[in-house]
Image: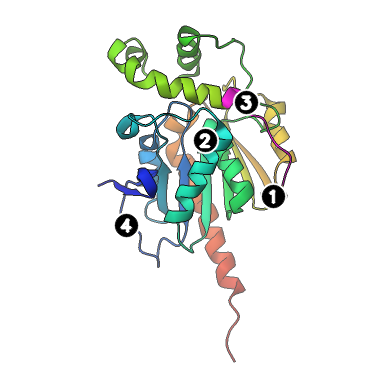
Amino acid sequence: MTTTLGPRAWLRRFHTTPDAATRVVQVVCLPHAGGAAGYFVPFSAELSSVADVLAVQYPGRQDRWHEPAIDDLHELTEQVLTALEQALDERPLILFGHSMGALVAYEAARQLNPARLYVSGCPAPTRGVESEDDITDDASLLADLSKLGGTDAQLLSDPAVLELILPALRADYRAVRTYQWRPGPEPTCPLTVLTGDRDPRTPGDAILEWKRHGTGEHRFHEFEGDHFYLTDHTRLVAELVAADLTGMRNEAATDVKPGR
């Protein structure tokens, strides 16, 4: 059963209400351009036994279709931060963002300084999105989306479906392509960069440039697949995150000093 949290239902919990004794960390997932919170249902299922997994539902899609989508990434980040501030508790926070969601997670991490930050399928903020094609109209937008994979081609040819998804897609693409990195404090937490080895959006130099962002440890993991490698490797990625959570718990335990 899905639980909605935060003002105007920005956050979704798809699995069991957490027991603080076993789910001592909150993981907030931020989806890609055109994506919705439901993309992370399988990821949540894999992690739900060890973490309280929440996913962000951007306005302008699915049950929030009647709300205007946000076409400025910095504004979108500010609204996500407002929702998080009202919904999160004192447990350590992990941010996990895919594609556009990685930029939102990064910008949010600059203010929140979470325990860990995972950025997936996204070039470094100072690089911007790289594409072989210009996105000038709906046809080129849909062609770009189809090239990246992850969206059923039959859905993209259905006029009724397009009428529902195009407003959010237009806004999301505009938000990503007009995004400009602003100098300022960087996240101090460990930063993990995840990519697919056939993703045209993440050339090696654009990925390594993530080293410029963040003052903590940087790790890089490459998986077989395209821009939406996460769909096929949900379990592997969840296992990586779960291992980090185990490490965090062990570190916390060693920090506890025995009484006299």
Label 4 vs label 3: CA separation?
36 Å
Residue highlighted by disc 3? 202
Distance from label 2 to label 1 (Cα)? Answer: 21 Å
**Does the residue at mark 4 contact the one at mark 3 (Cβ under 8 Å)?**
no
Q: Which residue position is annotated with label 1?
A: 217
15 over 66 or under it: above or below: below
The residue beneath circle 2 is: 101
Residues rendered magenta in the picture? 176-184
User: Which mark identifies residue 17?
Assistant: 4
Rounded to the nearest whole Å, what is the CA distance between mark 4 and mark 1? Answer: 31 Å
Identify the image quadrant of residue 49: bottom left
Q: Which of 197 and 104 is in front in this view?
A: 104
> Upstream in the sequence, badge 4 or badge 1?
4
Can residue 150 be seen?
no
Closest to the camera, between mark 2 and mark 3, is 2
Question: Does residue 52 lie above or below 75 as drawn?
Answer: below
Nearer the N terminus, badge 4 or badge 3? 4
Q: Are marks 4 and 2 in contact (CB under 8 Å)?
A: no
